[in-house]
Image (cartoon, rainbow, N blue to C red):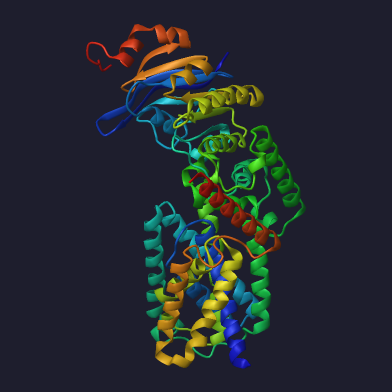
Amino acid sequence: MSALLELKGLTKRFGGLAAVNDVSLAVPEGSIFGLIRPNGAGKTTIFNLITGVYQASSGGIAFGGKSIAGLEPYKIADLGITRTFQNIRLFKNLSVFDNVLTACHASASYGIAEALFRLPRFRREEKELSEKAMELLKIMGLDGRFDVMANNLPYGLQRRLEITRALALEPRLLLLDEPAAGMNPDETESLMRLIGEIRSRFSLSILVIEHHMDLIMGVCERLHVLNFGCTLAEGTPAEVSNDPKVVEAYLGGGGSKKC
Amino acid sequence: MEYIQGILILSGINLIAVLGLSVLTGFTGLFSFGHAGFMAIGAYISAIVTARLHLPFALAILAGGLAAGLASLLIGRLTLKLKGDYFCIATMGFGEAIRLILNNWPWVGGSRGWESLGSYTNIWNVLVLDIVAVILVWNLVNSRHGRNMIAVREEELAAQMAGIDVYRYKMTALVVSAILAGIAGALMAHYMTFIQPKLFSMQKSTELTIIVIFGGLGSISGSVIGAVLLTALPELFRAFSQWRLVFYGLAVIVIMVGRPQGLMGGMELTPSGVRKALAAKRARAAAMVDDGGKA
């Protein structure tokens, strides 16, 4: 399998602190790839670098073989990378349906003038967008609550809606930032199944940051372990969980070595 | 009768400017305290077209709108990368700058103003333009472009991650609002037949913003009702002479305290909008019953 996303020597410094330090990894096409780290921030920074919210201090990011460093976030989204947030960021005052409908915008191409005068293309494409949004909600089991305001959804469903909204972009790579944060074991379990289903149904690759080891071990095919912003280990869940360096980082050992 | 018609014309003129500001503030979430500046540009450019170039009024309205739109492109380029409050302050500076330039430009009358312009604005052309503006703005905000603007208002970062070019949509909203403000300025110049930089002070900008908030952010019908009500209100209180502005202020405060989301609170006064509002009300009532059951 070829690499869909490739990070090469990615480094991000905030002043003297290197939040991400010389990280290289390759997410194979069609895989579910986990990114874990025993301590501190830095994983979300990697997501912010991939999606263009931050610019890397050094190193490169390639998507589908092409460099995406320095592109505006919306352009990176157009190329097929989208994400969810650790602290859910929905369009809170819009209905469930409108959240997804808004994210479908790239599937239509009518311009502003066509919208102002409601020309035929506007009508046709708006109808298609509505159908697409409703179909997505059905697949994700949210169609029963299409008219509920996003803010009023239960927490677990807000997560689900955020993932649905991301899927509306038809991404090739979905970044999930701690999707199980604040979820009980039942919700985590159903999220795990959902992630697997999404991957096969929408034929995309998923890069997931998570603390819940159950989820990570259960769903990921490959894991990348970071420690203090540097790569500690990489491999299948079984390999990683038996790696003495990883065990030491999680359970403590003879002092923490910086790389 | 003429008096009432006068109030209606003024309401109609304000409505056009307010609709534009509604797109910018209510739907895209950018606050501006400089829209009187765009009105001034529209008013003075249209006056030049009719009084100096002796061209038809329709052309003057068009020129006024376009000139304000062009000015907004320039301003947007300079200020739209600024975050929240900074953009607001920059617009305030822009509005004041326009007023001061006009104050010191003798060719257009300077601070004494420009009088005896043609009286071309009447209830009919205002009404037609109002209807056209409401329909176009309605169509805009109910399209994917309008939804993208709302997404920018709701959650900028998430909007970017959804592939929305935030800067472009902020710019679009600003230009739309400036064009409408320019048209309103052109209508005003040829209704009052006298323009003066003082008419376009920050007080005017604030008035427009108050109307948008009063009507409810993100509601076209709220903007319409707000524009008519708040333009007519000071006139209704005219009997109280110097106290009328106090009453005006009080009325605004009472509404904002009693209903901080504005008159319409993002809802629309259409059959489907009313259905939606009722459904939301039922859902809230049901939720309260649920909570009561648990307690």
- Left or right relative to B237: residue A13: left
- Left or right relative to B20: residue A135: right
The answer, for residue B285, to whether it is visible in the render is yes
Residue placed at 48% from the left, 41% from the top? A89
Determine whether A163 is above or below B87 in the image: above
- Name the one closer to the observer, A170 or B57: A170
Can you tell which quarter of the image residue B226 is in? bottom right
Residue A176, position as x, y percentages in the image = 50, 29
- Left or right relative to B198: residue A251: left
Can you tell which quarter of the image residue A259 is in? top left
Determine whether B35 is above or below B43 in the image: above
The answer, for residue B35, to whether it is visible in the render is no
- Name the one closer to the observer, A32 or B233: B233
Of all residues, the one furthest to the left in this rendering is: A255
Residue placed at 43% from the left, 71% from the top? B206
Determine whether B42 is above or below A75 in the image: below
Residue A138, position as x, y percentages in the image = 68, 36
Residue B115, position as x, y percentages in the image = 49, 89
Residue placed at 67% from the left, 41% from the top? A144
Residue B81, position as x, y percentages in the image = 42, 51
- Left or right relative to B124: residue B88: left
Quadrant of the drawing holding the N terminus of chain B: bottom right
Determine whether B189 is above or below A44 in the image: below
- Name the one closer to the observer, A248 or B128: A248
Residue placed at 40% from the left, 73% from the top? B202
